[in-house]
Each structure stands twice: as C-alpha cells, then as structure tokens.
Image: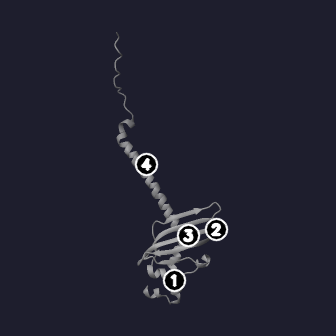
Amino acid sequence: MTLPPPIPAPSNLASGWWCRHWRWAMPLAVLLFLAALGGAIAWSVLRWTQAAHDSAPMREAMRRAGCSVELVQVFGEPLQAGTLPLGSMQTAINGERDVGLTVALEGPHAHGRLFVKGTRSDDVWDYPVMYVLAEDKQTFDLSALDDAEAAGECELQACRARGDCALTAAL
C-alpha cells in the first residue's frame, strides 16, 4: 500500500494588500462613500435654495411684500425670506416656466409663510397666486390685476413720499 501524498505546507508568499488591511480599509471606504453621497445631497439642496431665491417669482414676491403697507405694519422691516423654500420649478421645452414656491417670511414683529405661483409665457410672468399667511392666520394678498403695472409700483414708497403713511412716524 502506498502512502498518500503529504499535505502541502503553507506558502511563505506574502498575502495581498487587501488581505492584510481589509479590517480598516472597508470601513474607511464605506465612510468615504457616505461622505461623498452626503456632500452631493448638500450641494444639490444648496443649489436648489439659491435657484429658488434667485427666481423671478420669488424676487417679485419679496419686492411686493416689502412694498405692502399693511404687511410691513404687521411684520415690521426688514423682511427676510427663510433659508429653504419648498415647491417646484419646471421649464418646458417651448420655454414656458412654472414656479410654485412656499417660504418662511420673517420680520422683527411677526412671522408667516409666503406663497407664490408664477407662470412665464413669451418672457412675461403672470402671478395668479401671491400672498402671505401670518402666524395668526391673517392673509395679505400681494397679487395684482396687472402684473406688468404692479412691477413698477411700490405702495409703501409712495405712501412715505406723500407723508401720509402711518409707518413713517413709527420708523
């Protein structure tokens, strides 16, 4: 009877890098992936916030809010928009654009939410919805019958120029 072949001896060859370092390399790789994913999400949110604040409907809504005598009486000056608007911005292939945003509106005396919906067609914006809802559920309508005419007016500045504005004495 012949003896079975001997059991091979362990190889003295050096094992690979992964075999020696996987215990710390794997968690590090996962952490780096999660950090990159978190950074991409944060960057996207910051870009969205900037785009929403820089949109024509948001700028016009903040301008009209600052020009509303009643709103400034309740909220005070300066008015500031919150940091993270909620809503949507869509652009169609034909150039039409729909923007619907809600953002916190803060003043020294009160807080509320600003709602604006704008539609652009042929480079002309129409704002069917534009109002502020205060904490006490008081509503301030900022919409106008003619948006092109309203873009050049500021009721608060005209009131102060005439000198018959109740806010002039308070400020």
For marks 2 and 4, the one nearer the N-term is 4
Q: Badge 1: few (under 14), some or many (20 or more) residues near its Cα, within 10 Å? A: many
Q: Amino acid at mark 3?
A: Lys
For marks 1 and 3, the one nearer the N-term is 3
Find numbered disc 4 in the image and state the secondary structure of the residue it sits on.
helix
- Measured Cα–Cα span from mark 4 to mark 3: 38 Å
What residue is drawn where x is 37% and y is 32%? 15
Q: Which residue is mark 2?
A: 121
Q: Which residue is mark 3?
A: 117
Q: Is residue 26 above or below residue 136?
A: above
For marks 2 and 1, the one nearer the N-term is 2
Q: Which residue is mark 4?
A: 33
For marks 4 and 1, the one nearer the N-term is 4
Q: Amino acid at mark 2?
A: Ser
Q: Position of residue 74 (x, y in %)?
A: 44, 81
Q: Is residue 9 above or below residue 165?
A: above
Q: Badge 4: few (under 14), some or many (20 or more) residues near its Cα, within 10 Å? A: few
Q: Which residue is mark 1?
A: 156
Give the label, 2 or 4, closer to the camera: 2
Q: Residue furthest top?
A: 1
